[in-house]
């Protein structure tokens, strides 16, 4: 999907040297720009966050389990 210059915002990001080198190599190998790779990674991260939040919403009505009770149950069943 082509983007116009108006859709793009400039940002300065400081990367560790080794990450920058790896990113440059991946960009060259995939015929992508560093910006494209960074944008893709950010979108994937945000999508993962959205999926996590949806999972929390789906399980909101489930009963809470006390950590101590879970440990006791695991010990009782010989799992710990």
Image (cartoon, helix red, strand yellow):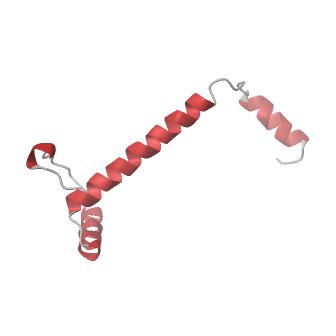
Q: Residue at x 25, y 69 (%)?
A: 27
Examine the rendered structure and indicate whether residue 4 appears above or below residue 16.
above
Q: Residue 74 is drawn in which quadrant?
A: top right
Q: How many marks?
A: 0
Give how far across and how far down residue 39 sits, in percent: 27, 52
Give how far across and how far down residue 71 sits, in percent: 78, 37
Image quarter in which the N terminus is found: bottom left
* Residue nearest the viewer, comparing 29 with 6: 6
Q: Residue at x 86, y 41 (%)?
A: 75
* Residue nearest the viewer, comparing 76 with 63: 63
From the viewer's perspective, tell me whether residue 49 is left or right of residue 42.
right
Q: Residue 21 is drawn in which quadrant?
A: bottom left
Q: Residue furthest bottom?
A: 29
Examine the rendered structure and indicate whether residue 49 appears above or below residue 22.
above
Q: Residue furthest front?
A: 1
Give how far across and how far down residue 4 sits, in percent: 12, 49
Q: Residue at x 33, y 49 (%)?
A: 42
Q: Residue at x 20, y 50 (%)?
A: 13
Give how far across and how far down residue 65 sits, in percent: 73, 28
């Amino acid at each position: 999907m082509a983007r116009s210059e108006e859709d793009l915002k400039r940002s300065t990001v400081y990367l560790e040297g080794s990450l920058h080198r790896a990113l440059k190599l991946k960009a060259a190998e995939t015929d992508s720009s560093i910006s494209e790779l960074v944008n893709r990674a950010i979108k994937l991260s945000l999508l993962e966050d959205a999926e996590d939040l949806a999972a929390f919403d789906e399980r909101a009505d489930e009963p809470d389990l006390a950590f101590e009770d879970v440990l006791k149950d695991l010990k009782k069943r010989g799992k710990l």
